[in-house]
Every structure is written in C-alpha cells, then in structure tokens.
Image: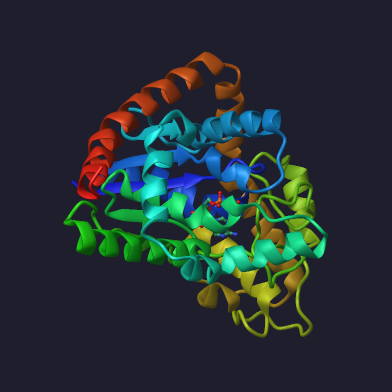
C-alpha cells in the first residue's frame, strides 16, 4: 500500500492556503487510499523566534483542526513530531549527507533569512538545516507520496536527492518519495499582496484567511482583497495576480477551473462576493466540528498518544537500519 506523509508547522493559526494546498486532500483522498501519517511538525517551529507556550498551544490547535477537517484516526495516523525521537536522530545522518551549498540554495531559506537579517535579527542555524529535518520526517516512514502545496516542491526535491545519495553510498535504505500537488490553488496568495504566498506566520494579517476566522471576518477580508487594474475578469497569474487568486480559491471551493469561471463574471465585485460565500460555506463544517473537539481535549490527547506510538513503531527500525548502514 502506498505510504503518505505530510505535515504542518505550528508557527501560527492554519490558513485557507494550508487547507486548499494540503489538508483538504489529506482528508478527502490520501487517508482513504494510502497508509497516511500526518505530523504536527513542532521542531520546525523552533527555527524562528517563538514563545514556547504558544508553540504548545498552536500544536494542540493544529491537531484539533486536522481532526475537524476530517482526518480520521481510524484511517490515518496523526502525531506530534517531537514525540517521536527518530526525526531528530535521522536528521543528523542526513546532515552528514547534504552539503551546505545545497542548503543555501533553498528559496525559503534565502527569503526568511533575508527578512530576519533586514530587521537585525540573527538567523538560527536550524533555519538553514530545516529542509534536512523535513527530509528526515519524510524518509523515516518509507514514504512514497508527499501531498503538499507548491511552496514545498523544492524541499521534496532535496529529500529525493538525499535519499538517492544515501542509498548510493551506503546501500538501499530509503524509499525515494515524490511530491503531489493539488490541481488548483496549489499556491494560495495573500489577499493584500497577491505576489506573495498566504502564509500563517504573520498573525492578524488582513490578507490571510484563517480557518477559524468568523464568517464575517472571512467576508470582509475577501471583499477587501486587492484586485488588479483593469475591469475584465481573466485568469492570468502574471498580469492579474489578485483576480487570478480569487478565481483559484473559488474554483477550489466549487470545483471547475479558474479559466472557465472567469467567463462567468463581469465585475470584480460579483467575483469577490461569490468567493467569500464559497469560502464561508467550505469552512462552516470545519468550524463547527472544531468547536466540538475543542471541548474534548482528552480525546485529542488520546489520538496524539496513539499516533506517536504507531509512528515510533514504523520509524524506529528504519532509522536503526540507516545507522547500521552508515557504519554505526
Ligand atoms: P506555512 O507556510 O503556512 O507555515 P506549513 O509549512 O505549515 O505552512 O505548510 C503546511 C502545508 O500547507 C504544506 O503542504 C504547504 O505546502 C501548504 N501551504 C502553506 N501555505 C500554502 C499556500 N499559501 N497555498 C497552498 N498551500 C500552502
């Protein structure tokens, strides 16, 4: 059976980008047709400034949201990365496989590092090595498929390179995984700056729809989305990034394709209104289920405990094998 692994970082509240790019497919498809593991990858949250209590809170919230989004612990494994030592153990071996040059070429490192330096912050070494830990997350489970948004494509490519290099040097240990991306909305853009990705880390952002935003907040954010100069509704990411983003969100909510939907609209206002309502409807069941689950923290704890036990049982023998292969 195909093995799937993917994860979310508890660096902020989950966004519509996380949902459309990744989480929705995990619930609708991946957990049904593969042996799927989903991690709350909290070690990755330590690569930037953070408040420890907030990381803990956000990890639990992310777990609750994943269950609210439809992940079923009877069908898949949901766990917290730091509860499974094998991720850090394997990460070190992969650091010995990767080169500093390939780490420095990672787009996310360049962008996040430059942003930190611009405001006089130092850059943690773990921000540079983050893709290696991500490779360990994936390889520790003999993963075949990694369902992610477009922004993670480069990191999954690196994971493939590291797996192949390790196998070539030390003998076959790792399955070489491949990324899968959604057909539409693989990169949801910020509503206020449609040239950059809707990312969860800038809290309170007017251009970010959070999964737990009140319906009126969702409507307001979408109605105030920056659109482009011009009047006609066309799907062209280069020249019309704002409108194209709305069309992709609407297409992802309702089915259909963004180019086809464009023809149905004569004004930006009507497009925004329909997109806002479609997103509100999409998120409604998730919000309701989240409220129920949040009232039952013991259930979420049980799910995470069982998830970590299963994940450990899978990762342990594989990581042991990697240590033996490398001569330890
Ligand atoms: P973030 O960038 O919001 O911190 P994570 O690194 O936790 O997100 O990613 C969780 C999943 O959500 C990944 O598969 C990632 O590719 C996907 N994702 C994140 N932002 C977006 C977006 N704006 N559009 C589509 N997918 C996204």
Q: How is the image coloured?
A: rainbow
Residue 296 lies, with reference to residue 68, above or below; the image says above
Q: Which is nearer the eye, 250 or 171?
A: 171
Is 71 left, or right, of 170 in this rendering? right
Q: Residue furthest front?
A: 327
User: How many labels sit on residues?
Assistant: 0
Q: Quadrant of residue 71?
A: top left
Is 218 left, or right, of 56 in this rendering? right
Quadrant of the snapshot with the C terminus? top left
Can see residue 89?
A: yes
Q: Which percent across, then down, holds residue 122?
A: 74, 55
Q: Which percent across, then down, holds residue 203?
A: 76, 47
Residue 220 lies, with reference to residue 63, above or below; the image says below
Residue 96 lies, with reference to residue 234, above or below; the image says above
Q: Which percent across, then down, holds residue 34?
A: 26, 45
Q: Which percent across, then down, holds residue 36?
A: 32, 42
Can see residue 256?
A: no
Residue at x 81%, y 61% (from the top left corner): 224
Q: Which is nearer the eye, 29 or 98?
A: 98
Q: Quadrant of residue 287?
A: top right
Q: Which is nearer the eye, 283 or 296?
A: 296
Q: Quadrant of ligand 1?
A: bottom right
Is 69 left, or right, of 232 in this rendering? left
Residue 249 lies, with reference to residue 296, above or below; the image says below
Residue at x 64%, y 34% (from the top left corner): 55
């Amino acid at each position: 059976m195909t093995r799937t692994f993917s994860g979310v970082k508890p660096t902020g509240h989950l966004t519509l980008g996380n949902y459309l790019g990744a989480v929705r497919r995990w619930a609708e498809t991946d957990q049904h047709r593969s042996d799927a593991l989903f991690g709350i990858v909290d070690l990755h949250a330590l690569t930037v400034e953070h408040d420890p209590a907030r990381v803990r809170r956000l990890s639990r919230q992310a777990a609750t949201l994943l269950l609210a989004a439809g992940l079923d612990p009877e069908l898949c494994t949901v766990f917290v990365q730091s509860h499974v030592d094998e991720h850090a153990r394997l990460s070190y071996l992969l650091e010995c496989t990767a080169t500093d040059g390939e780490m420095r070429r990672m787009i996310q490192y360049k962008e996040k590092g430059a942003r930190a330096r611009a405001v006089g912050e130092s850059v943690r070494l773990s921000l540079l090595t983050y893709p290696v830990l991500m490779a360990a997350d994936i390889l520790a489970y003999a993963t075949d498929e990694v369902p992610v948004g477009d922004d993670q494509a480069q990191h999954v490519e690196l994971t493939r390179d590291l797996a192949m290099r390790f196998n070539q040097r030390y003998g076959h240990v790792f399955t070489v995984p491949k990324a899968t991306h959604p057909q539409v909305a693989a990169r949801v853009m910020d509503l206020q700056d449609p040239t950059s990705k809707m990312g969860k880390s800038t809290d309170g952002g007017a251009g970010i729809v959070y999964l737990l935003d009140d319906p009126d907040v969702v409507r307001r954010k979408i109605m105030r989305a920056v659109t482009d100069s011009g009047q006609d509704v066309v799907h062209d990411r280069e020249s019309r990034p704002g409108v194209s983003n709305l069309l992709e969100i609407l297409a992802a909510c309702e089915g259909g394709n963004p180019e086809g939907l464009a023809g149905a609209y004569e004004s930006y206002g009507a497009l925004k209104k329909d997109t806002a309502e479609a997103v509100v409807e999409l998120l409604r069941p998730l919000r309701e289920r989240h409220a129920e689950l949040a009232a039952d923290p013991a259930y979420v704890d049980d799910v995470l405990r069982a998830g970590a036990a299963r994940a450990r049982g899978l990762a342990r023998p594989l990581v042991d094998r990697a240590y033996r292969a490398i001569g330890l």
